[in-house]
Image: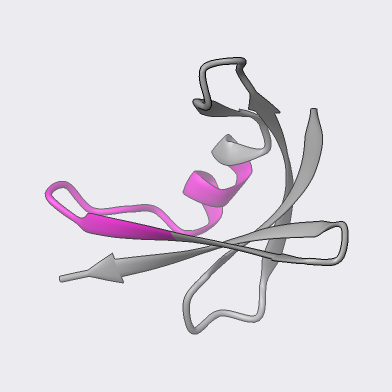
Amino acid sequence: MDNLMVSMHGSIDTYLMKLMKSQDDRALITTGWNRLVDADPFMMDDVCVFQFTQIDDLLSLTIHVLN
């Protein structure tokens, strides 16, 4: 399980989450997602783009909401 720093595009707030990778190359956010949703609720029909980046050992995710 890896630490994952998550932020919304255009926001300075970050959320520490846990990312579990399966053997078949799928991934699951296991901890912290609810904090993000409670702080920055998504609207029904929002389209989101998930942009993963890695610098050294730090994995981060930026979520872009397209309206």
Residue 49 is situated, as x and y percent measured from the top left of the image, at: 33, 60
Display colour scheme: one colour
* 51 on left or right of 43: right
Q: Is residue 32 above or below residue 26?
A: below
Residue 24 horizontal/vertical position (percent): 51, 17
From the viewer's perspective, tell me whether residue 13 is left or right of residue 37.
right
Q: Quadrant of the C terminus?
A: bottom left
- Span shown in magenta: 35-50
Q: Residue at x 65, y 81 (%)?
A: 12
Quadrant in which residue 18 is drawn: top right
Residue appearing at x 56%, y 50% in the figure? 36
Q: Quadrant of residue 64?
A: bottom left
Q: Residue lying furthest top in this view?
A: 23
Image coords of residue 26 (percent x, y): 49, 26
Residue 20 found in image quarter: top right
Residue 3 x %, y %: 81, 43
Residue 39 falls inside the magenta stretch: yes
**Quadrant showing the N terminus:** top right
Q: Is 5 in front, or is 58?
A: 58
Q: Nearer the viewer, residue 31 or 53?
A: 53
